[in-house]
Amino acid sequence: MSGSELHHRPRGVRRGAALTLVFASVLATAAATNSLPRSDEKSPALPLRAASSTVHGEDVARAAAEAMADGKSATEAAEEVVSRSGDRWGAVYDKSEYEEFEQGLDGRYTGVGLAARGAAGGLVEVTRVQPGAPADRAGIRAGDTVRTVDGASVAKRPVTEVMALLRGDSETKSARPGSAVVLGLERGGRHLTRTVRRAELTTESVTVATLAGGARLIKVESFTKGTGARVRDAVLDAPAKAGVLLDLRGNGGGLVSEAVKAASAFLDGGLVATYDINGDQRVLNADPGGDTTRPLVVLVDSGTMSAAELVTGALQDRGRSITVGARTFGKGSVQMPSKLPDGSVAELTVGHYRTPAGHGVDGRGITPDVQVSERAQERARTVLSGLGGNG
């Protein structure tokens, strides 16, 4: 499982009542920023699962207002209501936290500038260091193993948690630019210690590399603003008939509108997904004019979630790609934000989305066509070569 600081940010409703991920609340912020595609067209009659939350935004707002009238914390009252709702993805953010959340969707975040993945033995391996970022200036390299963060062992801890430690996230606050974090590393059998000061960074949501034989590797870290256009441009820039390996491993999601644009790079219109908002069924359609003939393999793992699963499911169900890797996370629910009287924001689950073939994703994930647990990229390149994509 791979991860990066931006989109893998474990976050709880305060006091740990429920767990959410910043970029797992993808559709919520898409709606908040008016970027959630809407349509008056009804989707096919599918047995969409009802929303899991039994509490509504007005209920949370009412509890917050009553708390304020009594001189109590509106945010804490809202958190209590959400925690009792049974909504797995429900969350409450104070004003500053939600502003940071929206900055992340703009491609900005506070961290040290590295990405990592789980390695053998429950260790965490650095996979990429952002050029010029604090981690780069501290001499941290791809291939380093992270053993400790601020003196605490991270062995056998999920990559998501380790990335949160690097960002400085806790249940009550996030670290600010300039704060320090001490990393214990291993490199070639040697133990190293590096003190890194966090900074406000911009993400490289899409990176492109040329594989042996001319195929393109397009790695999408998250679906922040502009990601869809960058994927489209990477496809257009690839040589004619060169295959594409679309790497969505560790992609925690992002803006659904950007995910639809990314899927559109490989489709000529048509259905990307259906979703429901309080039972009202709607559709997400691809833009016309995408490349429908170029060989395509999508690489996924257990860190592929939410909007990234939407892309995976669309390309798989439409017969546009072969999917390689491990079963995806299984986050296919729709959240909507409700602003509270004190400026904080509550997010509640209001529905779920399905792939073009009508498959539910939430709690199930997507099973790849070719399931592999090790050397997945190598296997994906073999599959791409078999499709004539010179992988």
Image (tube, helix red, strand yellow):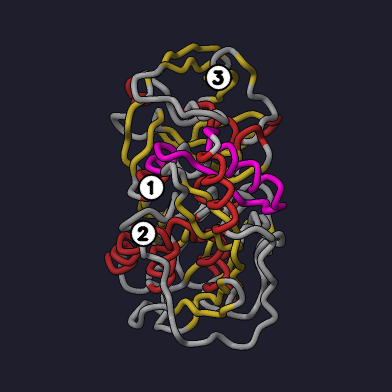
- Dot 1 and dot 2 residues touching (CB under 8 Å): yes
Pointer 3 residue = 149
Q: CA distance from mark 1 to mark 3?
A: 27 Å
Q: Going from the N terminus, do you reach mark 3 or mark 2 first?
A: 2
Position above or below: 110 against 350: above
How packed mark 1 is, by other alpha carbons closer than 10 Å (few <14, some 14-19, many 20 or more), is: some
Pointer 1 residue = 102
Which of 329/27 is in front?
27
Mark 3: secondary structure: strand
Q: Going from the N terminus, do you reach mark 1 or mark 2 first?
A: 2
Pointer 2 residue = 33
Position above or below: 27 against 16: below
How packed mark 2 is, by other alpha carbons closer than 10 Å (few <14, some 14-19, many 20 or more), is: few
State left or right for residue 55 relative to residue 289.
right
Q: In the orientation shown, which residue stands out farthest toward the front?
A: 70
Q: Which residues are magenta?
A: 71-100
- Mark 3 is on which residue type? Val
- Mark 1 is on which residue type? Glu
Q: Which residue is located at x 35 percent, y 53 percent?
A: 208
